[in-house]
Amino acid sequence: MPLSVRNSPLTCLPLTISHISANVTTSPFIDVKNLSEIADISEISSLIQAICDTLIESGQPKVELSFNDFGEPYSGLSGKSAEDFGKGWPYITYMNVYQNQIIDITDVGLVKINETEQQSVVRYGDILFTLSSETPDEVGMGAVYLGDIYPLYLNSFCFGVHITDESKIYPPFLAYYISSKSFRKAVFPLAQGSTRFNLQKSDFMKKKFLFPTVEEQNKIYSVLKAYSDKLSIEKNIANLLCEQKGYLLRQLFI
């Protein structure tokens, strides 16, 4: 079962940016020495997300913004057939957006793009969202692109937002924000449909959300990134130890 705020060490102490940021490497909230006890990567992700939700929903100053206030939407690939895929230029797949907070640049598809085509290109800092799903709670799932591949395209079943005003938003922060409980709760009513649910770009782009100030966004991202990196390292170590244990056990029976 994924960890939550209720059953994690996070409930033991108050959670503030100033407290955490000063103690990222020796924080009382997470005992990284015992991370090998967390067997599932989803549990680690849930723990980080719990910190994110608490920080975002804390009493820090908030700014009401729509994505139109700091970004410009664009569509994914258009006019493509099955024969166009499998070779050519890289593009971000639907599952890459759906499954990740930050786009995995090692997991891209290939698509043929002619020189005369007018297709939107993904840029660093873009926020990418799914347009449709079979359930309303999975509409508008998002990820942020923080890579340097160019040109890079987006699949037909997603849309992207170019950041046009970084004085209002810090793109890496959005990797955590768009998966927060408060954001997902706000997006849910925008899903329209009966058997398949869709997100209207125009409605989404003009909807107002509460964001921390850009200064707070930077602080929150720095804290969460530090935890993410440290937890990922510990998880990799735990996996290697499990593999080593399995190898040694197999050797006993040779």
Image (cartoon, rainbow, N blue to C red):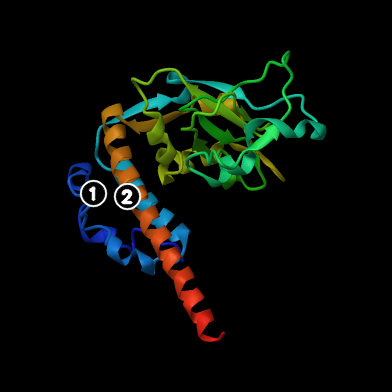
Q: Disc 1 or 2, which lies upstream in sequence?
A: 1
Q: Residue furthest top?
A: 116
The secondary element bearing badge 2 is classed as helix
Q: Residue furthest front?
A: 254
Please tell me which residue is depicted at 56% across the width and 38% down the height of the picture. Answer: 140
**Residue 142 at x, y = what percent?**
52, 38
**Quadrant placement of the C terminus:** bottom right
Residue assigned mark 1: 24
140 left or right, relative to 240? right
Quarter of the view holding residue 183: top left
For residue 87, above or below residue 7: above
Please tell me which residue is depicted at 31% across the width and 67% down the height of the picture. Answer: 34
**Residue 162 at x, y = what percent?**
50, 22
Residue assigned mark 2: 227
**Residue 20 at x, y = what percent?**
22, 47
Amino acid type, callout 2: Tyr
Distance CA(mark 1)–CA(mark 2): 7 Å
**Residue 68 at x, y = what percent?**
48, 20
Residue 31 visible, this angle: yes
Task: Compare residues 199 and 150 and report the one nearer the observer.
Answer: 150
245 left or right, relative to 84? left
Asked if labels 2 and 1 touch by Cβ distance under 8 angstroms, the answer is yes
